[in-house]
Image: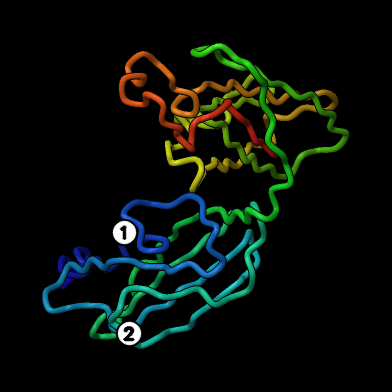
Amino acid sequence: SSMMQDKFCFKPINLRLDRGNSKIAVTENPTPVFSWGAFHSENNQYQTEAKVEVYCEENLLYNSGWIVKKEQELIYSGKPFTNGKRIDWFVSLRDVEGRESTRVKESFIYSDPDEIKAYWIGKENIAQRTAIYFSKKFNINKKVKRAVFNVCGLGLHKAYINGLNTDVAVLQPPVSSYDKIIYYTVNEISPDIFKMGENVISVILADGWRANYGFWCEPLLKDRDVPFMGNPQLLAQL
């Protein structure tokens, strides 16, 4: 009996946001769909009840309570998210016998595009295959508690604060038809990066597919106008 009890395992798995195929770190959706799977170490067991809890820092935004349901998803209907804040959500389950699962956590950042007040900047008449370097100095006179960095460089960007890389990914943002949809990065920045007094934001901007008029494209393009091509542009907000 003791050995069987030690082997018991029941937990939510594959927590997803808005039915994505992979973990989503950022969402603009104020009412996302939370979904999950379930693992149980015993046969003929399944989820009979579920509970979802959502927190912003230590503040409870939503608690569904125990809901009798076999469906493994739930639409958020709690308090509004705050722009740029990290949101933690937890899933707990009950099986056929009423035993509770392990409580599993996942996180994301809510980004409200209407809160991005920065404007596009760029430089005219840049030679192809030439990187553009932008920098902005700013002063801090009190301790930074939390920071979020929104960046969109068309075609590709690499962003730094005080010389430190702000994104582990490369070739950001993902390529798209820029005249229809534009992706941007949202990264939480460690307060330890900042220092009292002068700080510097630096961004390297490359043309990527924004201005890819290479010899391999000319036979295809001929006289056609490609709507998503143009001068490289940058939008960044800390």
Q: Residue furthest right?
A: 141
Q: Residue at x 32, y 74 (%)?
A: 72
Q: How many marks?
A: 2
Q: Residue at x 44, y 41 (%)?
A: 177
Tell me the distance, in whole angstroms, between the alpha carbons under discs 2 and 1: 18 Å
Q: Nearer the viewer, residue 42 or 205?
A: 205
Query: Horizontal and vertical percent for residue 174?
Result: 43, 37
Circle 2 is placed at which residue position? 69
Q: Residue at x 49, y 80 (%)?
A: 64
Circle 1 is placed at which residue position? 14
Is residue 238 visible to the viewer in this orientation of the structure?
A: no
Q: Around disc 2, counting alpha carbons within 10 Å, would you say few (fewer than 14), some (14 to 19), or many (20 or more)?
A: some
| Mark positioned earlier in the residue sequence (2 or 1) | 1
Where, quadrant-wise, is the N terminus in this rendering? Answer: bottom left
Q: Nearer the viewer, residue 28 or 147?
A: 28
Where, quadrant-wise, is the C terminus in this rendering? Answer: top right
Occupied quadrant, residue 94 = bottom left
